[in-house]
Image (cartoon, rainbow, N blue to C red):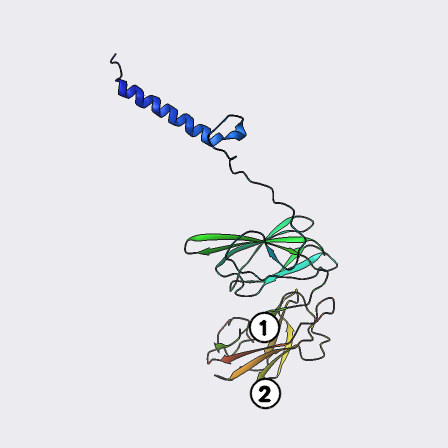
Amino acid sequence: MKRPLVSEVRNRSARRVARAMAWLLVIGPSSGVLGCNSEAPSTPVEPTPPPAVAPPVIVSSSHVGFDPTVSGATPTGIVYVAAPPGSIPYGYSVTIRGGPRNVAVSVYLADDGFDPVAFPAGPGDTLQIDVETYVSDSSSFASYRILVPATSRPVLLRTWPSAHARDVPLNTRPIVVFSEPVSIANSSDPAVQLIRSGIAVPGRVAFADTQHVSVAFAPEGLLVPSAGYTLAIGQDIRNRDGLTLAAGSAVDFTAGTSILDRPPGGAN
């Protein structure tokens, strides 16, 4: 048998030493064997209990901008979590966690925000909202912890049409979305009106969903082509606790000339 050259023996020995050093680097000091790595390997760590703080406090660094709303709890232990459009730029996913049952709920994002999501929790509970954004093939993560308040005012979350919208279909039914369920039955002023040239457009107001977080105005006829309109939201819209909006609001938009089968926001 041909004997290996001295250089081959040295190369084999060097490879064995390199493999041994790599093994020591991987197992580190946590295995009980003295390694070259001075730190323990990265392992999942249980999150520390969230602090009882409000308003929202960021607990991990990210460029994500976020302005969520959390309602007071209902008698059945449900709160509503929402985020206005544009508050999660490049939003990819949102998950709400926590509550007495420590549940997790994935949220559907639209226009870089999300409409109210019912979540099981009560006053004093802390919710964690995990946000993932995706920009230029790179993901970014942030987590927010929010204390559930005992009560809260309802907040105007978004409207369709949005402010300064143009070419709005003539058969549009304007819709207003709030941060939590509201009541419009006992409002001292009109809950939602559509105004053209200072005159209220005839129509009716009704809830657009079963949770009563969105209110629709259905005009009696089509919008006037190319006309300017104002969607007026009264302040005296109340939540379950009888609290009103902080202020009323007015949203201007311009009608187009088209009639669509299913325009955004609904149709007559």
At a point 46% along the width and 52% down the height, the residue shown is 139
Q: Is residue 24 above or below residue 127?
A: above
At a point 50% along the width and 80% down the height, the residue shown is 254
Judge left or right: residue 181 versus residue 267: right
Judge left or right: residue 261 versus residue 45: left
Location of the N terminus by quadrant is top left
- Observer able to see residue 116: no
Q: Measured from the top left, where is residue 118 in percent x and y?
A: 64, 58
Dot placed on the residue nearer the N-terminal end, 1 or 2: 1
At a point 51% along the width and 62% down the height, the residue shown is 112
Q: Measured from the top left, where is residue 95 in percent x and y?
A: 57, 53
Identify residue for label 1: 175
Question: For mark 2, does the 10 Å Cα neighbourhood hold few (<14), some (14 to 19), or many (20 or more) residues?
Answer: few
The amino acid sitting under disc 1 is Ile
Identify residue for label 2: 198
Nearest the viewer among 83 and 240 is 83
Nearest the viewer among 251 and 63 is 63
- Observer able to see residue 136: yes
Location of the C terminus by quadrant is bottom right
The amino acid sitting under disc 2 is Gly
At a point 60% along the width and 72% down the height, the residue shown is 176
Q: Measured from the top left, where is residue 117 in percent x and y?
A: 62, 59
Q: Measured from the top left, where is residue 219 in percent x and y?
A: 59, 80
Q: Nearer the viewer, mark 1 or mark 2?
A: 2
Q: CA distance from mark 1 to mark 2?
A: 20 Å
